[in-house]
Image: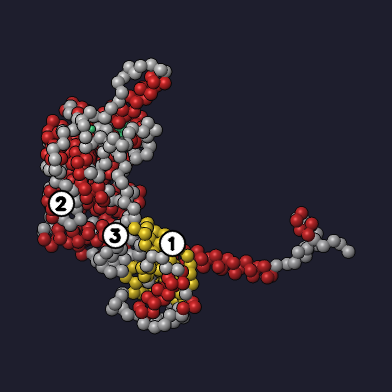
């Protein structure tokens, strides 16, 4: 949703009350602003019939009322009487749901709202507390920005949330066009549309939009469409219904068209039916009674699929939307050392250090780590890590005790990160330069409760697995040493076939 939302943040007049008749005009203006003056979109891509728009709204809302999932933020948006609290509750859910599945978010959301039920409570929290609660949810800057924005509302806006989508986007850091529209429509009933990944998919299918959905022309058209379609009397429900439809019925790979409440308005489905009819007529050697299915007929249409990508009958409605070209993630390697010692109560303790307060995983805790240049051999990687540990602890590190554990891969949104994991047991304490890098010793339990990333939890699991395997091997070899020699069965014990065959012959 991130890049699409960023692209979607382009300006377009809001128009919940505006209807389909004006949509084409809006589209022309938006496209003209991008340079050139392309032809207006064909009727294929528009909701040109007000009666159809009304019918679509009715069907979608009726389905939503019956089938919507029970989600904690939806309950709060309905029951919370205080408008600032209500907007805050929706805001938190929208930020958490960016890039994250609903099922994962629910538990985080409930804990967050329990701990910080108001903007004021969040504004008073420390970044450390925010990171601790956010740990495992990913994209950590979201929590940090949410808290910064809450502080701004409390200190600069007298605790009052901005009351329109435009002001929310303008005044709150980290709130883009989508989040602003969602908060304003759900919390304040402002008739403004939203465009997220789910909405893009549904609208592209409803109106056969096959051009790259991250292109400005398509994004402008989709925002115009969302603003034209939104139901003025229930904008929050309508927007949630459209997103819910994309999440549960009009899914990316296997849409349930048969169960879809708006299937009679779906032009992608219509196109599939036409293509099938055409194919079966051709198969029977008949002249087609239905004309060949073509794109919208507008030359150089910015909304149709590119000519180089013809209709693929095996894909059906999933021909729409076109998949946006994915940027390849950067490949990086980092050497990480799990430093451990026996604490004063005999429990195993690990050393964790805090990352800088800006950049990737800002403020989170991790095992001492150092980025590796590409192409280093294992021995060189080891040396880099030893140098790093030595510079940081200010004392020689027992190089012979540094054990290679293995590699742990973690995919961040834009980085394919491989952690080359080592472990090192220290006998006593080490003197650490706390000024240059905050650090602390933690037990396993404390580690899990700390603001550490999922990647670091994977690193610790790899170490524990290795330890488990080693102790298993040690036990196995002890058993082997103490094993009875073959054939030394007790009198009366039945021999297995293998043992019998290998047992010495009786004298
Ligand atoms: S009919 Fe199918 S493709 Fe069209 S909106 Fe419904 S689920 Fe999506
Ligand atoms: Zn077209």
Determine which of the numbered discs, if any, sits on residue 408 in the image.
1
In the picture, measured across the screen, residue 144 lies left or right of residue 155, that is right
Ligand 1 is found in which quarter of the picture? top left
Q: Mark 2 points at which residue?
A: 169
**Label 3 crowding class (10 Å Cα cut-off): few <14, some 14-19, many 20+?**
many
Q: Mark 3 points at which residue?
A: 140
| Circle 1 or circle 2, nearest the eye | 1
Where disc 2 sits, the SS reads helix
Q: Does the residue labelled 2 lie within 8 Å of ligand 1?
A: no
Q: Position of residue 438 (x, y in %)?
A: 31, 74
Where disc 1 sits, the SS reads strand
Q: Where is residue 453 in the image (x, y as percent from the top left)?
A: 35, 62
Q: Where is residue 394 in the image (x, y as percent from the top left)?
A: 36, 82
Depth check, front residue: 486 or 27: 27
The residue located at (46%, 78%) in the rendering is 399
Of the numbered discs 1 and 3, the one sitting upstream in the chain is 3
Of the numbered discs 1 and 2, the one sitting upstream in the chain is 2
| Circle 1 or circle 3, nearest the eye | 1
Q: Is mark 1 within 8 Å of ligand 1?
A: no
Q: How is the image coloured?
A: secondary structure
C-alpha gap between disc 2 and disc 3: 20 Å
Determine which of the numbered discs, if any, sits on residue 80 in the image.
none
The residue located at (18%, 43%) in the rendering is 185
* Residue furthest out toward the right: 507
In the picture, measured across the screen, residue 381 lies left or right of residue 142, that is right
Q: Is residue 170 above or below residue 369?
A: above
The residue located at (17%, 61%) in the rendering is 151
């Amino acid at each position: 949703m991130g890049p699409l939302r960023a692209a979607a943040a382009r300006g377009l007049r809001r128009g919940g009350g505006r209807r389909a008749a004006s949509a084409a005009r809006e589209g022309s203006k938006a496209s003209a602003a991008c340079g050139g003056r392309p032809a207006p979109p064909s009727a294929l891509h528009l909701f040109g019939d007000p009666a159809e728009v009304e019918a679509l709204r009715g069907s979608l809302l009726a389905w939503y009322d019956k089938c919507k999932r029970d989600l904690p933020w939806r309950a709060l948006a309905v029951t919370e009487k205080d408008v600032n609290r209500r907007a805050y509750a929706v805001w938190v859910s929208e930020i958490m749901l960016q890039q994250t599945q609903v099922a994962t978010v629910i538990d985080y959301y409930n804990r967050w709202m329990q701990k910080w039920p108001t903007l004021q409570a969040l504004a008073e929290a420390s970044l450390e507390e925010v990171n601790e609660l956010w740990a495992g949810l990913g994209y950590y800057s979201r929590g940090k920005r949410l808290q910064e924005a809450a502080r701004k509302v409390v200190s600069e806006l007298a605790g009052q949330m901005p009351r329109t989508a435009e002001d929310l986007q303008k005044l709150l850091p980290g709130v883009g066009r989508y989040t602003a529209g969602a908060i304003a429509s759900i919390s304040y009933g402002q008739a403004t549309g939203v465009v997220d990944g789910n909405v893009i998919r549904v609208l592209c299918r409803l109106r056969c939009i096959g051009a790259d959905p991250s292109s400005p022309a398509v994004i402008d058209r989709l925002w115009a469409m969302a603003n034209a379609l939104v139901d003025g009397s229930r904008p929050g429900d309508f927007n949630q219904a459209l997103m819910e439809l994309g999440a549960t019925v009009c899914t990316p790979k296997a849409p349930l068209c048969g169960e879809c409440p708006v299937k009679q308005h779906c032009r992608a489905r219509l196109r599939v039916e036409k293509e099938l009819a055409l194919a079966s007529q051709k198969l029977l050697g008949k002249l087609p009674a239905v004309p060949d299915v073509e794109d919208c007929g507008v030359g150089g249409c910015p909304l149709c699929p590119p000519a180089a990508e013809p209709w693929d009958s095996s894909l059906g409605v999933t021909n729409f939307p076109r998949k946006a070209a994915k940027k390849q993630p950067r490949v990086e390697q980092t050497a990480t050392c799990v430093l451990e010692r026996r604490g004063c109560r005999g429990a195993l303790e690990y050393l964790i250090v805090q990352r800088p307060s800006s950049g990737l995983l800002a403020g989170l805790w991790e095992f001492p780590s150092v980025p590796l240049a590409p192409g280093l051999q294992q021995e060189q990687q080891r040396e880099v890590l030893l140098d790093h540990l030595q510079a940081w602890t200010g004392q020689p590190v027992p190089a012979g005790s540094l054990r290679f554990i293995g590699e742990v891969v973690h995919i961040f949104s834009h980085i394919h990160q491989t952690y080359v994991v080592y472990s090192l047991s220290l006998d006593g304490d080490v003197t650490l330069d706390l000024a240059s890098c905050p650090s602390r010793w933690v037990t396993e339990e404390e580690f899990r409760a700390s603001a550490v990333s999922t990647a670091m939890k994977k690193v610790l699991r790899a170490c524990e697995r290795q330890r488990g395997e080693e102790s298993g091997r040690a036990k196995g070899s002890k058993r082997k040493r103490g094993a009875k020699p073959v054939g030394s069965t007790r009198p009366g014990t039945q021999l297995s076939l293998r043992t019998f065959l290998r047992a010495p012959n009786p004298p």
